[in-house]
Image: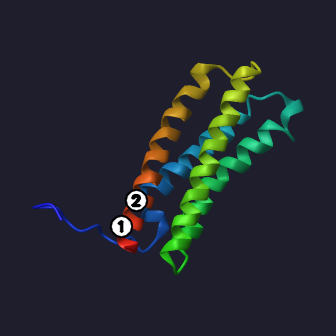
Amino acid sequence: MLTGAQPAKKIDDYRGLIVWQKAVRLVVDSYNLAKNLPRSEIYGLTSQIRRAAVSIPANIAEGHGRKHTGDYIHHLSMANGSLKELETHFFICQELGFLTELQIGPLLERSTEIGRMLTSLIHQLRLRQG
């Protein structure tokens, strides 16, 4: 441990995780952005965006509730996969002309931040796991 470093504080409730809070905010913003898609995409990209977005905080929460660290890491990895899926849907929407770079840019920036946070949390859990 580095001099002056504090041990990581255990968070007993997933709602206290900043990464979960940011992921929930991303869900809300993704839903709002998906409202701009054509009606013809209600069962296509709109549905896929919503599903992928919701999976991110849901997997963080589910993993946090598991008894074994390996299960937690697995669910965080699934959340990260859903995050990459969501980013891909945004890029596809842009390529199809449904959304602009200006519309998706802020969500992609937050997605990158959430991805870094998930990677860091996974790393910390692996270190703790030994």
The residue sitting at 61% across, 57% down in the picture is 78
Instruction: Describe the element under mark 1 as helix, strand or loop.
Output: helix
In percent of width and height, residue 34 lies at 72, 35
Q: Where is residue 38? Give x, y as percent.
A: 83, 27
Q: Please tell me in which quadrant of the rendered image residue 74 appears.
A: bottom right
Q: Residue at x 61, y 43 (%)?
A: 84
Q: Residues within 10 Å of mark 2 (few under 14, many from 20)?
A: few
Q: Which residue is mark 1?
A: 127
Residue at (60% x, 20% y) in the render: 101
In the displayed structure, 66 sits above or below 17; it is below
Foreground of the two, 77 or 65: 77
The answer for how far apart the CA atoms under marks 1 and 2 are is 6 Å
Residue at left 40%, top 73%?
129
For residue 65, above or below residue 124: below
Labelled pair 1, 2 in contact (Cβ < 8 Å): yes
The answer to whether 2 appears left or right of 64 in the picture is left
Q: Quadrant of the C terminus?
A: bottom left
Of residue 38 and residue 9, the one placed in the foreground of this image is 9
| Residue toward you, 42 or 63 | 63
Q: How many marks?
A: 2
Question: In this rendering, would 90 be left or right of 76?
Answer: right
On the image, the x and y values in percent for residue 60 come to: 55, 62
Q: Quadrant of the N terminus?
A: bottom left
| Amino acid type assigned to the residue bearing label 1 in the image | Leu
x then y, percent, for residue 118: 47, 53
Label 1 Cα neighbours within 10 Å, binned few <14 / some 14-19 / many ≥20: few
The residue where tag 2 is placed is 123
